[in-house]
Image (cartoon, helix red, strand yellow):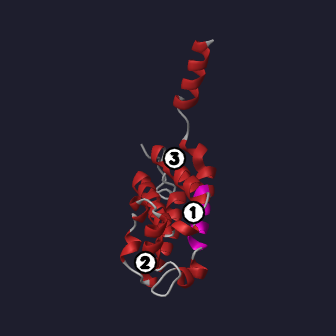
Amino acid sequence: MMRAIRTDWARFWFRPRSVQDLLYPRIAIGTVAAIWFASFWPNLSLWFGENGVLSTETAAAMIELEELPRWQMWSPLWWSDSLLAYQFWLVAGVVLSGLLIVGPGGRWTVALLTAWVIAWAHRCTWLIGLTEPALVACIGYFLLQPGPRYLLGRSQP
């Protein structure tokens, strides 16, 4: 019985599969990530920027007051209250999400998008929910299997 379980387990995880099997999950996760980034745009000036509810000064005071771990302040977005920087971050996040779908850059694109999502989530700690951990896990999965390069017409090794 145990041998059959081990065999089935090994077959499930290590059986060679086509990278095309991940086409639809890749499109779905990339689309969700793009929508997630874009959803912050309409209220960006309300939440962030010099006079925003979560300006760097106010948010840092809230982190200190709530005694949140310092690692939650890992994000380059803590360095500035410039709305232009936040707008750039969101546009770049949408572009990286699109690149996840299309496939150029392979693991480098996926790694950059993963870091981009985590950095944004760490900057807007009070606005996140269940979506962000799931999104990071799903995008991180593509580090293991980056998939085909659709625009280039060839598969990744």
**Residue nearer the viewer, 146 or 43:** 43
Q: Tell me: residue 90, above or below residue 14.
A: below
Residue assigned mark 1: 33
Amino acid on which the number 1 mark rests in the picture: Ala
Q: In this view, does 42 lie above or below 76?
A: below
Q: What element carries label 1?
A: helix
Q: How crowded is mark 3: few (under 14 residues within 10 Å), some or many (20 or more)?
A: some
Residue 107: x %, y % from top left: 42, 51
**Secondary structure of residue under mark 3:** helix
Above or below: residue 11 compared with residue 108: above
* Towards the viewer: 67 or 128: 67
* Image position, residue 92 (x, y; %): 46, 71
Marks 3 and 1, Cα distance to the nearest angstrom?
14 Å
Residue 67 lies in the magenta stretch: no
* Element carrying mark 2: helix
Task: Tell me where the magenta segment starts and ends, as one range.
Answer: 29-39
Mark 2 sits on what residue? 56
Percent of width and height locating residue 125: 51, 66
* Kind of residue at disc 2: Thr
The question of residue 36 being in magenta is answered with yes
Q: Which amino acid does label 3 sit on?
A: Tyr
Of callouts 2 and 1, the N-terminal one: 1
Disc sitting over residue 141 in the figure:
3
Contact check, label 3 and label 1, Cβ < 8 Å: no
Characterize the magenta stretch by its predominant secondary structure: helix
| Residue at the image position 49 percent from the left and 65 percent from the top | 66
